[in-house]
Amino acid sequence: AKELARLLYELQALQGHVDKKNSELMALNQENNEQALLALNTGRAKLREESDALKEEMLAVAEAIPKAARKQQQVMQEAQRAQRGLQEAQDLWHAQVNITRNALKVEENELAKLSGCREALHLALLEGRRASLDLSGKVAQLRSEYGRLLNWQQAHSAQSESDPFGLEAMAAELRRRIQRRGATAAGRCGGSVRLCLHSGYGEMQKFASEETASRREMSVYQ
């Protein structure tokens, strides 16, 4: 825009100069007409010189006008290209903004899902811990019951030769009780009770070991 303004200013200056020269020429012609007889010989040479200079200036102006027009056209084309580039950049920026917004929405949804899953996992963990504590309490009760049964069998020695104290039957009954209670706990807390069941089965194996040791001790007593 500054280049275009400068070119227009130069054109106006040249046009003003031409107008000024034309005015001077008209004034000179009028003066020459009034003093034609006196100044014809002296003014003719000067007039020719000025006319030649004016012609040269007019030729220069005639050559400068197409150049200025071409320059103006180039400036306009560059301005149009710059405007198109600006529009494309704005469109690209808007597209990037929309993509970023959509990505943020997706991330927010994922964060909400992860928060819900974390809350559910926390609740399941708490439920599993409660089930584990409950199962541990029941296992302790079963161990106490097993001890009472063992004492009772030691008091009643009139049992069979293969299982003199009925320990195998009691151990099987204990295993069934542990499995039933473990299944009940699994129904309450879902997949989190696997750890609880594992602990219960460990206690059951411990009972079996104690059963074997007790049988060995009773065999020694017999």
Image (cartoon, rainbow, N blue to C red):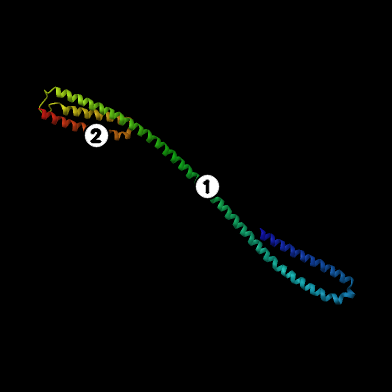
Q: Whole-percent x and y of residue 208?
A: 19, 32
Query: Where, by quadrant of the figure, is residue 189 drawn?
Result: top left
Q: Amino acid at mark 2?
A: Gly
Q: Residue furthest front?
A: 221
Q: Is residue 184 visible?
A: no
Tell me which residue sits at (17%, 23%) in the image.
152
Q: Position of residue 183 (x, y in %)?
A: 28, 30
Q: Is residue 154 left or right of residue 200?
A: left
Residue at left 80%, top 67%? 22
Q: Which mark is residue 97?
A: 1
Q: Local crowd at mark 2 within 10 Å, few (<14), some, or many (≥20)?
A: few
Left or right of 110 in this view: 51: right
Mark pair 1, 2: CA separation: 59 Å
Q: Are marks 1 and 2 in contact (CB under 8 Å)?
A: no
Residue at image location 29% in from the left, 35% down from the top: 195
Q: Please tell me how crowded label 1 is: few (under 14), some (14-19), or many (20+) other residues with Cα within 10 Å.
A: few
The C terminus sits in image quarter: top left
Give residue 30's quadrant in the image.
bottom right
Q: Residue at left 85%, top 70%?
A: 29
Figure check: 48 above or below 90: below
Q: According to the image, label 2 marks what residue?
A: 202
Q: Quadrant of the N terminus?
A: bottom right
Task: Work out whether mark 1 precedes mark 2 in sequence or the reverse, and give the earlier one.
Answer: 1
Residue 214 lies, in percent from the top left, at 16, 30
Residue type for callout 1 = Val
Identify the element where label 1 is drawn.
helix
Report helix, strand or loop for mark 2: helix
Mark in the foreground, 1 or 2: 2
**Residue 94's spot in the image, x, y percent?**
54, 48
